[in-house]
Amino acid sequence: MEKKKIGFELLIYENESELSQNDRKLLHDAAAAREKAYAPYSKFKVGAAVLLENGEVVIGNNQENASYPSGLCAERVAIFHAGAKYPGVAVKAIAICASSSKQEVDVPAAPCGNCRQSIIEYEQKQKSPISLLLSSETGPIYKCKSTADILPMAFNSSFLGDS
Ligand code: THU
């Protein structure tokens, strides 16, 4: 029997003044997108900004539905938007931020499992990591170098035997 510990490096910034100018800008783009979220049911607004290798930024926000499961998270709206608009252009980073009108969000918003899986698909397709910048309204900012770091043992196309 072998025991293996799986871990990853998380960078924690106290506030956005500690970020590079580029990261700060991407976070502001995510915050602007968050304000346009359609979240009448949860009141939890999420914005995501995707930075592409060509320098373009593509945004997304959560889009809810009266039939709850029909809605979609900000991260997937954003990454699918990027895939639709710039197919074949690698994604470098995604900034995410969240707010709620029900309570103060002070813990950085991390993508749900489905969104992690969806983002990892793009990492595998482009063969390079997609870093994540996670923020809240008042709390610290987290950065991780690769989305695969936060979904260890993710499912991927190699299981399907076609690659
Ligand atoms: N949501 C996101 O947009 N991203 C996440 O990673 C977690 C949750 C949205 C989905 C739904 O509209 C609301 O937040 C509450 O779950």
Image (cartoon, helix red, strand yellow):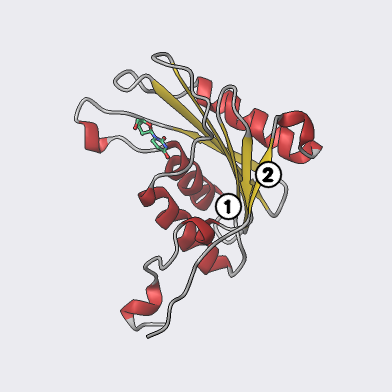
In the picture, the disc for residue 40 is: none
Residue 67 placement (x, y as % from top left): 19, 30
Residue 53 in the image: above or below residue 45: below
Residue 43 in the image: above or below residue 80: above
Q: In the rendered structure, which amino acid carries the disc numbered 1?
A: Tyr
CA gap between label 1 and label 2 equals 9 Å
Residue 144 in the image: above or below residue 124: above
Q: Quadrant of residue 108?
A: top right
Residue that mark 2 sits on: 56
Q: Secondary structure at mark 1?
A: loop
Q: Is residue 19 left or right of residue 135?
A: right
For image coordinates 45% across by 44% down, the residue present is 111
* Number of other residues with Cα within 10 Å of mark 2, as a class: few under 14, some 14 to 19, many 20 or more: few
* Number of other residues with Cα within 10 Å of mark 1, as a class: few under 14, some 14 to 19, many 20 or more: some
Q: Is residue 14 left or right of residue 69?
A: right
Q: Are marks 1 and 2 in contact (CB under 8 Å)?
A: yes
Q: In the rendered structure, which amino acid carries the disc numbered 2?
A: Glu
Residue 160 placement (x, y as % from top left): 32, 78
Front one among 105 and 116: 105
Residue 79 in the image: above or below residue 7: above
Give the mark nearest the N terminus, 1 or 2: 2
Q: Quadrant of residue 24?
A: top right
Residue that mark 1 sits on: 86
Residue 21 placement (x, y as % from top left): 80, 36
Front one among 82 and 124: 124
Front one among 17 and 60: 17
Number of disc labels: 2
Q: Secondary structure at mark 2?
A: loop
Residue 39 placement (x, y as % from top left): 36, 22
Q: Quadrant of residue 64?
A: top left
